[in-house]
Image (tube, rainbow, N blue to C red):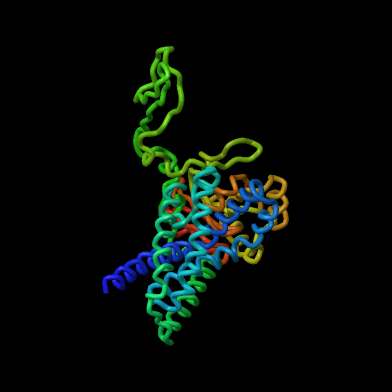
């Protein structure tokens, strides 16, 4: 009896963590695919060049992984096909443990994305979390014969239902935007404020003094101290946004982009842009011409490519450049749209949900948009 209760607790812990992790990533499968691309880039340099070719299928792989996490978690909790489920979870957790160890030990990918953008873990925290799960799953494997299968039709129906629902949610999130936005540029964020520390940053200085390591709160002035490293004492006060920058060949326009009413057409890669809704975006461009709302084109491609696509669609608007990672972080759509009012994020859209001019006008507080 005690053993069964213990195994039940273990099943619920492991299954619950896999369901939670999977649902967080089902919410944003594109974010998981971006993380896969980071790993494939690293592995292509460190292990074998063929990993680079896997970037082309990173999104299907991401959807498969996040759905499998949810389904296996559900199957473990309801004890459906326990032998298959525990072995499948064992394979997945060994794979995850390898990734997190590789990230932590070699300091290659500093965020494994285990819980998406909802909960940030350091590489070593992610690794030890996986080691904890390895131990629990090993227990389930050892006592696999003690897990009484629940292989009836209701259990199968629940498993299939979890498969259908999680797959549907993942596809919907890809074709729209994540249901919940855990990123730094979510709606309501005041970007200029988020680019500033929330408190005065405090540092400690590691120095070498006569062969001994000492830690000091102020930088010493004596020549007998040799600097080793500087560490921040209150990292929670660091700016939430540190990489937002907009520029072109004429200079930096970050500050200008964070003033006034702006509609940013954001493109992470012009060569892979989805052009199915460009006519709707064009209506925004034309609708806000000669108004107090400025529509601009921001891409992570070259200026020549930006000029070419603006000429193709006849959009007489300014173009700017930004980092591809930042653009992908801001909006999970290529192209996507972000509306700013003095740097505050008023709205974001997937190109499939491109708003009308009247919908964007309602977002601004000043109501002084002139036709």
Side of 301 where 31 appears, left or right: left
Q: How many marks?
A: 0
Where does the image place residue 358, in percent across and percent down from the top left?
50, 63
Which residue is outermost to the left?
2
Position of 329 relative to 356 (above/below): above
**Residue 249 visible at all:** yes
Please state which of residues 54 and 10 is positioned toward the viewer in this rendering. Answer: 10
Where does the image place residue 185, in percent across and percent down from the top left?
46, 51
Residue depicted at x 48% and y 72%: 166
Position of 312 relative to 64 (above/below): above
Side of 161 where 218 appears, left or right: left
Side of 232 where 328 appears, left or right: right
Where does the image place residue 32, in percent across and percent down from the top left?
53, 59
Please state which of residues 59 and 188 is positioned toward the viewer in this rendering. Answer: 59
Which residue is outermost to the top?
223
Q: Quadrant of residue 179?
A: bottom left
Residue depicted at x 35% and y 33%: 200
Side of 205 where 44 appears, left or right: right
Which residue is outermost to the bottom?
153
Where does the image place residue 202, in percent across and percent down from the top left?
36, 31
**Residue 287 visible at all:** no
Q: Quadrant of the N terminus?
A: bottom left
Please state which of residues 132 and 68 is positioned toward the viewer in this rendering. Answer: 132
């Amino acid at each position: 009896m005690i053993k069964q209760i213990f195994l039940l607790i273990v099943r619920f812990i492991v299954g619950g963590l896999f369901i939670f992790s999977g649902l967080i990533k089902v919410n944003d499968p594109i974010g998981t695919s971006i993380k896969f691309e980071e790993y494939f880039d690293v592995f292509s340099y460190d292990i074998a060049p063929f990993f680079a070719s896997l970037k082309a299928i990173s999104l299907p792989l991401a959807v498969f992984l996040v759905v499998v996490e949810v389904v296996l978690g559900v199957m473990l909790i309801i004890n459906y096909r326990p032998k298959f489920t525990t072995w499948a979870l064992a394979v997945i957790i060994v794979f995850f443990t390898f990734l997190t160890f590789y990230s932590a030990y070699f300091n290659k990918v500093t965020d494994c994305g285990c819980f998406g953008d909802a909960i940030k873990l350091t590489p070593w925290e992610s690794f030890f979390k996986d080691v904890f799960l390895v131990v629990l799953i090993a227990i389930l494997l050892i006592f696999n014969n003690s897990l009484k299968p629940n292989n009836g039709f209701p259990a199968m129906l629940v498993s299939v239902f979890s498969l259908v629902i999680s797959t549907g949610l993942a596809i919907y999130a890809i074709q729209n935007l994540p249901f919940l936005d855990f990123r730094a540029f979510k709606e309501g964020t005041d970007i200029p404020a988020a680019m500033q520390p929330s408190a005065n940053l405090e540092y400690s200085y590691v120095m070498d003094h006569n062969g001994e390591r000492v830690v000091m709160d102020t930088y010493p002035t004596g020549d007998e101290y040799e600097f080793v490293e500087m560490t921040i004492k209150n990292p929670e006060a660091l700016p939430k946004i540190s990489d937002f920058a907009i520029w072109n060949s004429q200079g930096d326009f970050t500050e200008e982009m964070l003033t006034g009413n702006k509609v940013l057409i954001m493109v992470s890669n012009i060569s892979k842009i989805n052009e199915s809704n460009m006519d709707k975006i064009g209506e925004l461009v034309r609708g806000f011409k000669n108004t107090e709302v400025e529509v601009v084109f921001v891409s992570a491609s070259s200026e020549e490519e930006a000029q070419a696509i603006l000429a193709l669609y006849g959009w007489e608007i300014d173009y700017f450049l930004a980092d591809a990672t930042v653009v992908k972080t801001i909006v999970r759509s290529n192209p996507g749209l972000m509306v700013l009012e003095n740097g505050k994020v008023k709205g974001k859209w997937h190109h499939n949900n491109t708003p009308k001019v009247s919908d964007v006008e309602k977002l601004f507080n000043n109501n002084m948009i002139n036709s």
